[in-house]
Image (spheres, coloured by chain):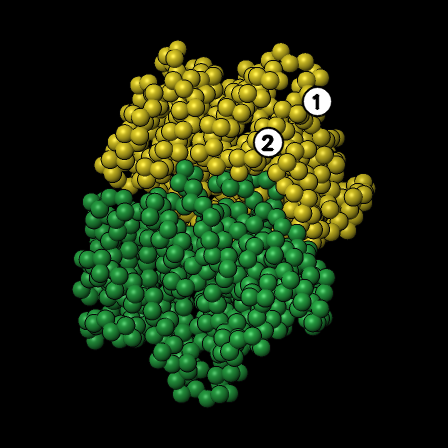
Chain colours: A green, B yellow
Amino acid sequence: MKFNQITPEILAAFEAIVGSANLITARHVEADVYAGYGRDHTEDLHFAPDVVLKPGSTEEVSQIMRLCHEHHIPVTARGAGTGLSGGALPIHNGLVLSMERFNKIIQIDERNLQATVEPGVVTEAFQNAVKEVGLFYPPDPASKGSCFLGGNLSQSSGGPKAVKYGTTKDYVLNLQVVLPTGEVIWTGANTLKNATGYNLTQLMVGSEGTLGIITRVVFRLLPYPQQNILMLVPFRQEAQAAEAVSAVFRAGIIPSGMEFMEREAIAWSSNYLNIPLTLPEDITAHLLIELDGQDLDQLYKEAEQVYAVLETYDVGEILLADTAAQKDDLWRIRRNIGNSVRYNSVYKEEDTVVPRAELPTLLKGVKEIGARYGFKSVCYGHAGDGNLHVNIIRGELDDEMWNVGLRQPISEIFELCVKLGGTISGEHGIGLVQKPFISIALKEANLNLMRGIKQVFDPHGILNPGKIF
Amino acid sequence: MKFNQITPEILAAFEAIVGSANLITARHVEADVYAGYGRDHTEDLHFAPDVVLKPGSTEEVSQIMRLCHEHHIPVTARGAGTGLSGGALPIHNGLVLSMERFNKIIQIDERNLQATVEPGVVTEAFQNAVKEVGLFYPPDPASKGSCFLGGNLSQSSGGPKAVKYGTTKDYVLNLQVVLPTGEVIWTGANTLKNATGYNLTQLMVGSEGTLGIITRVVFRLLPYPQQNILMLVPFRQEAQAAEAVSAVFRAGIIPSGMEFMEREAIAWSSNYLNIPLTLPEDITAHLLIELDGQDLDQLYKEAEQVYAVLETYDVGEILLADTAAQKDDLWRIRRNIGNSVRYNSVYKEEDTVVPRAELPTLLKGVKEIGARYGFKSVCYGHAGDGNLHVNIIRGELDDEMWNVGLRQPISEIFELCVKLGGTISGEHGIGLVQKPFISIALKEANLNLMRGIKQVFDPHGILNPGKIF
């Protein structure tokens, strides 16, 4: 694709659309503020946009897109910048479209258990707002306190509750989308069922900002589960922790959380947060298991069944969280593993996913590959979904190995995922950093279909160019 | 699109691929058997195929598609022929690809709660097979005893359990698809989460056989809910029955079934099945409410909460089904409404869907439109999803009104659905019979995207031509 520069005339047109307060270039703000628009939470990448616009309405986004389509100017939509695959980075420069002003919860429809929101609402703020009226929006990525719903949609984000409740994609009913040409559509209807033409809604979800700009979302909601039980289960053998995951499901229990943490993951995070945690020497891994529902007696019955399953493994003393504060601590430890790894070392995170019973094989394979290539990894993740975050630790690796040499072992990890029936990203997306590995997961025929779809939506290829494929 | 005839040479090539036993033309079988391949369960439509093939493997389908792609021959895939929108009818003649030999359950993976099946497996047979090992495949269209899983995928079928468990689309993890060019792909991975490129899996689901031929499916499964409670709730006012639906959800209960039946729907069906049912004169509608789970005590608690909600309405005596036989009778009555309507009268069925709290408004609107245009309707359906099947009864309507005049009131019903946030098909698909109404639900920009996607998958337009748009 050949793109054009933003001329002074086009810049003036942008300013006329969004107003001068909502147009930023390197000249308008301090260098580090501006640089922030070219970064996300992915390793150490930076690409400077030529201009940042903060539109305030669908109509403004439409006008901007029309102009960019006409002049072949790259447009990269940006949410909160918490992505882990470089998906929101403007690698061809051009325009960054910051959706931060789309921050309104438009309606919480208690009659229909639905809500209409803008994509710049922070995920946790939305969860809290619906909880206030007894409703539940389950998707909860680790960054829920800062990430935007729009970013969650772009990357098909999950989180710990996905094991019982599904991911972001399972809560979207309808999307308002500005197409690259400036046309505005709704992708579906505000209904739980829809058999009316191709599913454009699910085509948008996970498309990483390459097909259109989401400007409004209708989510379905659930009644809020009023009760929960949380237990931390220490294992003496990592492989058994991974095996126990599948066994709990086979006993007929669907936990609302089923998280796996290697010893180092939990140790680093509890140190990082300064939350004391007893960690006997022989413990190599933990499962954090949550059960939720409307009735506590019922949950205790289910917990007994879970205990019965766990007894068949070599587990240490199970910690049953007694208070809301203790539960909060345990979840904070789990959520901050990523931050603590970042605090301890430079690292690369791979978002591997396999059918859940294959988790022991994947974990063993990751360690074996690490041993062979001489790197250490800290692994944790959503074990109930078979979604294992593999953090490769920089440690003593030299620049050559870190920047080039790791590509081979990472390929081997991804090949193992695919061989086990899985794929190379469960919830972080492909973006920029996993793009070199896409052909491990997808055949050329799949990629050709995706390229064709991209061409249909975006004939000039201006939306988030250079991502996914 | 311009299509070619099947020449004797091409016919010979087909025969070489599938074998003579699996190639049928009008000369090979009795006229009514052959005619069956040109019909489905939609009203009184018939279109004769030029030839019917029954391939036995993905490789055979691939060879057939390659040939048809090269020679521009229309291909209409066919499951069990239970569709209600004419989706499987070969309206441009050509080839009907009957998937009846793809009838194997390849693997039930108890470790991963997954199953790999061929698309020609009967839905209920699959449900029973997984139930034997304690697993649950929830989607259950009314025709589950005869319909194929492949047809369910094509039409994004639902059924009564969708209110709690979602529709067919929510259980598909991965699809093997033969593209119109003959290429074979898998659309995704066998994982609960996947953020690896565009969601081709969900693009296939509901695409009504216009994008590719599904030859293998990986479904996710759930632990089988061992207990259930079923209650039949009579209402003196239809509108209150529709209102109570939403109220139950707001009380924090998610029933596993929440079916609405007008008086005539339930009366006709119980007569048709010869199942005696007390139906006091003042009762105008019923809700059939099912709760399910692993623990009966828990279900009784929930049932009490449902009773508390229902007490606020003008209901008759609630029938709590005591035995498995009684439950079976009630569900048979519900499932046979369609058959009993067909038995009583020529009819047209519209598959309307709205956000669930809008159901009373939709129902009132349907009756008002009927009164204005002089037709009677029998309404029933999946109230928990806002999915109302409107059966327009032929009665005394003349040919002109039946064949032409009804188009206007049907349009008005659909326009009302869209105005209420809904759409024109919840689970039956657009196929042939709803195609004239598609622009009520979808803007030209949506349709253009869909046409573009179709072109990417099927450049010669040979797959199920003339459907949806």
Same chain letter for marks 1 and 2: yes
Q: Is residue A134 left or right of residue A191?
A: left
Q: Residue at x 53, y 35 (%)?
A: B420
Q: Position of residue A463 (x, y in %)?
A: 63, 63
Mark nearer the N terminus (1 vs 2): 1
Say which amino acid is labelled 2. Phe
Residue A342: x and y in percent read 38, 76
Give residue B386's position: percent from left, percent from top: 47, 34
Q: CA distance from mark 1 to mark 2?
A: 16 Å
Q: Quadrant of residue B304?
A: top left
- Label at residue A107: none
Q: Which residue is mark 1?
A: B404
Q: Residue at x 57, y 77 (%)?
A: A26
Q: Quadrant of residue B234?
A: top left
What residue is shown with label 2?
B414
Asked whether residue A374 is in view, the answer is: yes
The amino acid type found where label 1 is placed reads Val
Disc 2 packing (10 Å; few <14; some 14–19; many ≥20): many
**Residue B63 in sight here:** no
- State which quarter of the image contains the C terminus of chain A: bottom right
Q: Write down the chain letter for disc 1.
A: B
Q: What x and y, as percent, mark residue A439?
A: 58, 67
Q: Nearer the viewer, residue A332 or B35?
A: A332
Residues A264 and B238: in front is B238
Q: Secondary structure at mark 2?
A: helix
Identify which residue is drawn at 57% across, 36% down.
B418
Up-down relation of residue A241 to residue B237 (above or below): below
Q: Secondary structure at mark 1?
A: helix
Which residue: 53% across, 51% down?
A216
Comparing labels 1 and 2, the label whose residue is closer to the camera: 2
- Tell me if A310 is positioned left or right of B450 in this view: left
